[in-house]
């Protein structure tokens, strides 16, 4: 392989010179995470305080806005790389802490270790965390730059090795790239896990032209934010992957499809596209190779079904986002009836790494049938919410407990909903299940795009199934009778069960109807919508039986099957904590000063239970609600 061409080498040299200006060891470098997770926690205010404090003290320091490091639970995050000192990462940073860090560490010599997440070390030009325990389980490939570079500065991406893979790919034959992807074992990370190279080869072999490449960033799963975080934190690796894919299949036009509800991702992708064009990395005659390819950003309107590739294509064409029958598959007849390659954000982000490091390197990670890594968004009842990237085959227990930190508040793990709203709910017995495409499918779940919602003992699995089915039923496009009406009937039955009107035969009907919907639906949304019902019936059937036969919710979650009472012998007459917090004024005092809850007014919001001082412990929650309360020493 010859050396990089002169055009790219000059671009890289300029980028290194630019980055060296603030990583030359002469001044502090301060990085503030300003992805959506950081902004929601107050990162922009922290950023403003840091800049103002530096200006006030006339301190020469570089302040960079970076993306998501994955530690969303600890936002706002600040990394300080001070000359002569190890770089330090600080979590839960408030404006007050930010002022102290500037005063005591940037200007002074006190590193304020009580605010650190963990020590850092220098990694080339830009530091990275290395000693947090979770990193022994993780392997970052597509999250490598996330949180360590400014996503709005293409030169930082190039200084970290960005676009080297594109330069290398443009000096390969297109078929060589397809072969490299095939040998790597890369499977699509959008949910289905289809072998990537097969789609590529079908698109490349299709006789019709022009050909298109589409990046599917329409991430609509509740609790999922992997694609959004990547686009916000390192958009250029996705763009680079798209150009490589386009060269391999002979496409000249591309689209990045991002839902409009991701305004920061939209803005940063737009900036990245402009920067790539300005350096000749996108557009006409890319790097002097004679290859032409350009990308447009398309903003989706938030329809979950548009994550399905044929519905996404219809949306770009200006039509309603409704799936169509296949075949023909999009690789043969897609956008405007032309061959169209559609890959997920994460799938495309792997390509630069595979081209740079080789197919054998990627194939050496993960399991036999699932090569590489998986990126998950940890959400729900887990201590360390955020992003993680692990080798395929890592167990659920390692992800939830060793990386995620386990269940907060001393609660017991109950289940994990994996694969989005169409995924499955797996119980505690499945914690040692290896996470890969095949193992999860056999257990009744699916990899999906990478959402992982952790549930604890306070979650009712019947209500969880109802909640996710309500989402998919509402998002159904209505084209298929089984999906449109079948999910509606299942939702009605689940609602009846959670409200105490369920019948024993409902469980059998739900099972049969779920199987029919899977068989009779056109697209993936309908085929997978019953998964939460099927898995909860399989692993948590006892909860269905309790709701139906005993009119009882074991988790004390279903409103129609619970009631709140105040124990007379525990209620402190002089305490009005519950009275003051009741939003509907359902609590009053009787003649003896004991608090009483009016069951007709009570909306079961749980505020009285939370407000009752622990030394009294007077508020209890019961199921079934008609039980006469007795004095108990617990809530």
Image (cartoon, grey):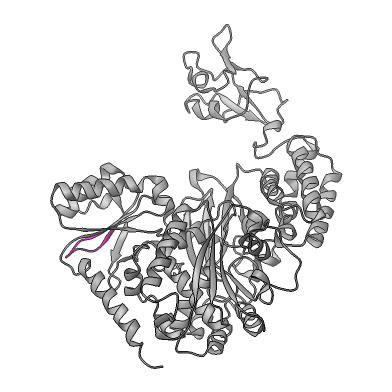
Report the residue that reaches farthest toward the right.
505
Q: Is residue 101 left or right of residue 277?
A: left
The residue at the point 73 percent across, 35 percent down is 552
Residue 584: image x %, image y %? 58, 21
**Percent x, y for residue 9?**
31, 83
Residue 119 vs 282, above or below: the answer is above
**Residue 373 on image: x %, y %:** 52, 71
* Residue 357 shown in magenta: no
Residue 453 vs 209, above or below: the answer is above
Residue closer to the observer: 523 or 38 = 523
Tell me if 494 is positioned left or right of 24 in this view: right
- Magenta region: 80-88
Q: Nearer the viewer, residue 274 or 193?
A: 274
Q: Can residue 502 be seen here?
A: yes
Name which quarter of the figure residue 448 lies in: bottom right
Residue 230 in the figure: left or right of residue 562: left
Does residue 422 lie above or below 197 as drawn?
above
């Amino acid at each position: 392989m010859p050396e990089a061409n002169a055009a790219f080498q000059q671009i890289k040299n300029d980028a290194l010179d630019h980055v060296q200006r603030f990583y030359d060891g002469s001044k502090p470098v301060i990085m503030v995470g300003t992805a959506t997770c950081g902004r929601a926690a107050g990162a922009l205010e922290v950023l403003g305080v840091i800049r103002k404090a530096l200006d006030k003290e006339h301190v020469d320091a570089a302040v960079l806005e970076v993306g998501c490091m994955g530690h969303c639970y600890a936002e706002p995050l600040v990394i300080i790389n001070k000359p002569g000192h190890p770089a330090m990462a600080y979590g839960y940073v408030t404006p007050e802490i930010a002022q102290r860090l500037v005063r005591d560490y940037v200007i002074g010599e006190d590193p304020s270790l009580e605010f650190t997440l963990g020590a850092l070390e220098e990694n080339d030009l830009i530091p990275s965390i290395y000693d947090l325990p979770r990193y022994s389980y993780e392997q970052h490939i597509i999250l490598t730059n996330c949180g360590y570079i400014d996503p709005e500065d293409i030169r930082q991406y190039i200084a970290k090795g960005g676009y080297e893979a594109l330069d290398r790919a443009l000096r390969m034959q297109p078929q060589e790239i397809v072969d490299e992807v095939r040998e790597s074992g890369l499977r699509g990370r959008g949910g289905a896990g289809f072998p990537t190279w097969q789609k590529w080869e079908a698109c490349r072999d299709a006789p019709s032209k022009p050909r298109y490449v589409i990046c599917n960033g329409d991430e609509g799963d509740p609790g999922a934010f992997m694609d959004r975080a990547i686009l916000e934190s390192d958009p250029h690796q996705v763009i680079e992957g798209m150009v490589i894919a386009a060269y391999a299949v002979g496409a000249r036009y591309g689209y990045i499809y991002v839902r409009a509800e991701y305004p920061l991702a939209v803005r940063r992708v737009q900036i990245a596209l402009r920067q790539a064009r300005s350096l000749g990395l996108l557009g006409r005659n890319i790097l002097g190779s004679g290859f032409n390819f350009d990308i447009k950003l398309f903003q989706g309107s938030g329809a979950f079904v548009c994550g399905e590739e044929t519905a996404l294509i219809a949306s770009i064409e200006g039509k309603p986002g409704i799936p169509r029958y296949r075949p023909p598959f999009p690789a043969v007849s897609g956008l405007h009836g032309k061959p169209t390659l559609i890959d997920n954000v994460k799938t495309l982000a792997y390509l630069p790494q595979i081209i740079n490091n080789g197919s054998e390197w990627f194939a050496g990670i993960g399991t036999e049938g699932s090569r590489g890594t998986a990126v998950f968004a940890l959400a729900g009842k887990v201590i360390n919410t955020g992003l993680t990237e692990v080798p395929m085959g890592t167990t659920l227990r390692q992800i939830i407990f060793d990386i995620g930190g386990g269940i907060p508040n001393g609660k017991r793990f109950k289940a994990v909903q994996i694969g989005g709203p169409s995924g499955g709910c797996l119980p505690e017995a499945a914690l040692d299940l290896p996470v890969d495409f095949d193992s999860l499918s056999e257990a009744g779940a699916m990899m999906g795009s990478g959402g992982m919602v952790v549930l604890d003992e306070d979650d009712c699995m019947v209500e969880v199934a109802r909640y996710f089915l309500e989402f998919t039923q509402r998002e159904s496009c209505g084209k298929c009778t089984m999906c449109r009406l079948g999910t509606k009937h299942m939702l009605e039955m689940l609602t009846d069960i959670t409200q105490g009107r369920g019948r024993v035969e409902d469980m059998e009907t739900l099972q049969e109807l779920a199987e029919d919907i899977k068989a009779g639906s056109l697209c993936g949304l309908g085929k997978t919508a019953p998964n939460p019902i099927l898995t909860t019936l399989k692993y948590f059937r006892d909860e269905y039986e309790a709701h139906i036969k005993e009119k009882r919710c074991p988790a004390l979650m279903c409103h129609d099957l619970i009631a709140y009472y105040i124990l007379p012998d525990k209620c402190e007459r002089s305490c009005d904590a519950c009275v003051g917090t009741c939003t509907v004024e359902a609590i009053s005092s009787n003649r003896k000063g004991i608090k009483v809850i009016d069951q007709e007014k009570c909306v079961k919001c749980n505020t009285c239970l939370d407000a009752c001082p622990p030394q009294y412990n007077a508020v209890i929650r019961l199921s079934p609600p008609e039980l006469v309360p007795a004095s108990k020493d617990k809530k």
